[in-house]
Image (cartoon, rainbow, N blue to C red):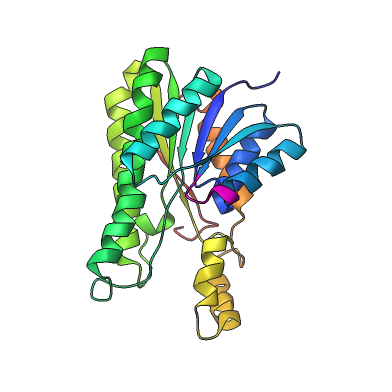
Amino acid sequence: MTDQRSVIVTGGGSGIGRATAVAFAALGCRVVVADARLDAATETTTQIGRTGGEATPMRVDVSDREHVHGMVASTLELYGQLDVLVNNAGVGIAGDVLETSADDLDRILAVNVKGVFFGCQEVIPPMLAAGSGVIVNVASVAALKAVTRRAAYIAAKGAIVALTRSISIDFMRRGIRCNSVAPGTVDSPWIGRILADADDPIAAREAMVQRQPLGRLGRSEEIAGAIVYLASPEAAFVNGACLVIDGGFTA
């Protein structure tokens, strides 16, 4: 049976977000692909359309409350309902607490924390009106096991895990579930940019792979599968959880 749910995926223009949007569309869901780059969001929707899926691209800066409000309002206008929000959009900047500028800190918190907060604020009212809804927030394994020179990023992702628990407690008896996922190092465009900035990109990649217990980086599709599960009826008893998908990195 075709899944007719309406789903928003932020940061859906690449990496985990794109894989997640494609996975939901493959089930028959109607997907809003939100991204700060409209061209990237459009590429994702084009990919979905090639396989007969239904998706709509939107340019959304999640750090802007008005953008997030418009995203939710447009989704409700398009599809008449909003069943799932995947807060995936995020940014990362390298640096320890001494190396991180105030501007960089503000940017990371604006996108990674305020963006998730705004998304939840906007979708919870229509979900409450409908009597059901699911929110999945994309955190990071770095929130559970620190890595070097990612101070602001780790702080922001830790806030997402805590916020997820808070929302789950506040709204679980009103039909809304909220969970997070904590991906390990995933072979994504963001990791590609980090490696490209290294003095020796090949050596940097090899070092990144070597610290993985499985001897490889994760795939975006592996994280997407976990997100789809958390949004599914099969996960009805899962609430306030942080699902770690890290190839054993935190084992």
* Number of numbered discs: 0
Q: Residue at x 57, y 71 (%)?
A: 209
Residue 96 sits inside the magenta stretch: no
Reply above or below: 145 against 177: below
Q: Position of residue 58 (x, y in %)?
A: 52, 39
Q: Position of residue 166 (x, y in %)?
A: 27, 35
The part of the image, by quadrant, that contains residue 2 is top right
Q: Position of residue 169 (x, y in %)?
A: 29, 28
Residue 37 sits inside the magenta stretch: yes
Residue 144 visible in the shown view: no
Q: Is residue 107 toward the left or the right of residue 24 in the image? A: left
The part of the image, by quadrant, that contains residue 67 is top left
The part of the image, by quadrant, that contains residue 170 is top left
Q: Residue at x 46, y 33 (%)?
A: 85
User: Residue lying furthest bottom in this view?
Assistant: 199
Give whichever of 224, 126 is nearer the camera. 126
Q: Quadrant of the N terminus?
A: top right
Segment colored magenta:
35-39
Reply above or below: 161 against 141: above
Q: Residue at x 57, y 62 (%)?
A: 189
Q: Is residue 57 toward the left or the right of residue 125 in the image? A: right
Give whichever of 25, 203 is nearer the camera. 25
User: Residue lying furthest right in this view?
Assistant: 51
Reply above or below: 109 against 5: below
Residue 38 visible in the shown view: yes
Q: Is residue 98 toward the left or the right of residue 92 in the image? A: left
Q: Position of residue 83 (x, y in %)?
A: 49, 24
Q: Residue at x 72, y 36 (%)?
A: 49
